[in-house]
Amino acid sequence: MHVKKLFVHEWKDSWKLVTLFNVIVLVFTLIGIVALSNGNWVDAMEKNAWYATIYVSYFMLYYFAILALGVATTFYFLIRFYKNLYTDQGYLMHTLPVTSHQLILSKAFVMYIWQVISGCVMLVSILLLVNSLVLGIENVNIFKALLEEIDLADLDISFLGVLDIIVVILIAIGGQIFSIMFGYLAISLGQLSKNHKLISSIGIYMGMQIVLQMVFSFFQIGFNLTVVNVDRPSEGLVFAILCLIAIVVFAADAGMYAGSNYIMKNKLNLE
């Protein structure tokens, strides 16, 4: 059995619930577009407390739906990783003619795709809803206005500027992989505990988050000292810092992946 077959199996097993998460957000978005695209809702809120309650409730539900989509997508796949590979289901998964590399990669690939899909759904949803709000209040289509303001002929991007954009995209990809491998490593480390493996995984995840925040704060201080406090940082300096960030992110991805694979391959304990 190859990674492709594992990928197909993982996709078929997971797509329905994650699709539902995204459909719920899209339904809330369509409701908002219909309800907010004209200015009547503003007058209705001012004149009728019931209308105000309904609209405020909608915005609250929409906010929680957007928030839940990102959180639910991530933790749904992390729970699948735990249940499929480190509980009783793992007895079956680890008897398949596949390597630990293939098990991790197949699950990570499906999770990555769905995180990208959910991210795009959230971005498009927010943009459409903001456009509906502006259209209803100011009668201005922000997408049309933005296109009218942008003149590609006036853009003057240097070669280093193009490279900066490419590196930023790579950092975004690496950052998404980081969130996956971060969860996988926490779960894998939790399995080293003889008792309460799930609780150990959660505790390790939270502890790693605290350490990560401290590391980010350290890098933020360094960034402020080298770039923000410089009046006009050179393009070369910006490019070098972006490259350094990319190297750190992908090195961390590789390290966490290697750690998860090592534990699964050499320290597996399903008792």
Image: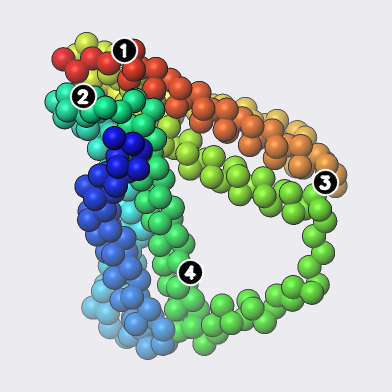
168 sits left or right of 196 in the view: right
Q: Residue at x 82, y 64 (%)?
A: 156
Q: CA distance from mark 3 to mark 1?
A: 47 Å
Q: Quadrant of residue 267?
A: top left
**Residue type marked 4:** Leu
Quadrant holding the C terminus: top left
Local secondary structure at mark 3: helix
> Which comes sooner in the sequence, label 3 or label 4?
4
Q: Earlier in the sequence, mark 1 or mark 4?
A: 4
Determine whether label 3 and label 2 are within 8 Å by CB.
Answer: no
Q: Nearer the viewer, residue 62 or 192?
A: 192
Q: Which residue is mark 2?
A: 95
Residue at image coords 25%, 37%? 80
Q: Label 1 belongs to which residue? A: 267
Crowding around mark 2 (Cα neighbors within 10 Å: few <14, some 14 to 19, many 20+) is few
- The residue closer to the viewer here, 115 or 258, is 258
Q: Are marks 2 and 1 in contact (CB under 8 Å)?
A: no
Residue tagged 3: 235
Instruction: From the top left corner, tell me how far across and down residue 120 is, in percent.
Output: 45, 60
Locate residue 1 relative to residue 261 in the image: left or right. left
Please state which of the two labelled residues, at mark 2 or mark 1, is closer to the viewer.
Answer: 2
Q: Earlier in the sequence, mark 3 or mark 2?
A: 2
Closer to the eye: label 1 or 4: 1
Residue type pointed to by label 3: Glu
Residue in the image at 34% along x and 81% along y? 35
Mark 3 vs mark 2, CA separation in Å: 53 Å
Q: Amino acid at mark 2?
A: Thr
Distance from Cα at disc 1 to Cα at disc 4: 46 Å
- Report, in whole angstroms, how far the alpha carbon at label 3 lies from the one at label 4: 31 Å
The residue labelled by disc 4 is 127
Which is nearer the N-term, disc 3 or disc 1? 3
